Amino acid sequence: MTHPAPGAAVPGTGRRCHLVSCGVAALTLTAVLASCAASSPGTAETDRIATTVAAAISGQRQASADGLVRAALATQAGTDTRLVVVEAQDLHADELVDPRARLVFRVHLDASGSGLSASEPVTACYQARFNFYGVVGRPRRIDCPAGAEPIVPPPLAPVARVTLPSGFEGTLTETLAGLPAGPSAEEVVAAVASALPAPGADPNTGLTNLAPMVDATVVGSDVGVSLWAAIDRDCLLGARVDGQVSVGSPSRVQMQPGELTCDPQTALHLSDLTQPH
């Protein structure tokens, strides 16, 4: 670049250039050019995909960077391979707001359209950091790491499922009917737990299933009991109110977050529950 000599007229301005002002102008122009040269490729659509995926996996509090990778690959963009993860790193975090994982997304869009509406293929990379609450800020464009390959996270180790025994309603009815007049909550839990059949093996994993969580409450002479399989959100409730036994399961809709809870207090009002239309 040729700079005007001190005191010479600056082309197109009609003003003369002083040494200091010319130096500042040159440095500013150099900084702008460097910034432009350092910008990373991407489009509004690749920005949208990266931001959407980061927001989608923010609601799933994963224990590790690998967990976030699995969540990202399970999104629509991850499933159809528009988005892959090429870097995943666990970070040290002292506070909940501190980043605890770093991912690099690579988003690729093929060429599309024709004529004036045609778009060229584009590949863009984004860095995103996640804390306990989700993505920190928004994913930002970066240059794609050279030679980076899509990450395939290791498979999750199988875990035993918690299951409700099929056809246990009749047994629960008999158990509640056979309780003494004034049992303690501990006695109710023990009676129901002992009536549960031994869990069987899961044919998919070969692991032995776990028994549901049993809880009970006693209010005067009334008894409420709940059996809860959290992962599948299966719930069985039983109550003995005024000597009358009732057993039933809330619908899946009623067991959604923010609706009913599977607990003994809900069981005491089992007769008031109505199935949704």
Image (cartoon, rainbow, N blue to C red):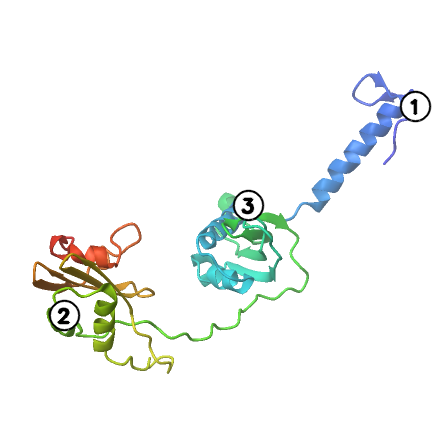
Q: Are marks 1 and 3 in contact (CB under 8 Å)?
A: no
Q: CA distance from mark 1 to mark 3?
A: 46 Å
Report the residue marked by disc 2. Answer: 179
The residue under label 1 is which amino acid type? Answer: Pro
| Viewer can see residue 80 | no
Image position of 134 (left or right of 38): left
The residue under label 2 is which amino acid type? Answer: Leu
Q: Comparing marks 1 and 2, which lies closer to the viewer?
A: 2
Picture residue at 72% right of the left edge, 44% below the top = 37
Picture residue at 88% right of the left edge, 27% below the top = 4
Q: Are marks 3 and 2 in contact (CB under 8 Å)?
A: no
The residue under label 3 is which amino acid type? Answer: Arg
The secondary element bearing badge 1 is classed as loop
Report the residue marked by disc 1. Answer: 6
Q: Which residue is outermost to the right?
A: 6
| Viewer can see residue 139 | yes
Decide: few, some or many residues near mark 2? Use Cα within 10 Å; few <14, some 14-19, many ≥20. Answer: some
Q: CA distance from mark 3 to mark 2?
A: 58 Å
| Depth order, front residue of 223/50 | 223
Q: From what the image shows, is residue 11 above or below residue 154?
A: above
Q: Which residue is outermost to the top?
A: 14
The secondary element bearing badge 3 is classed as loop
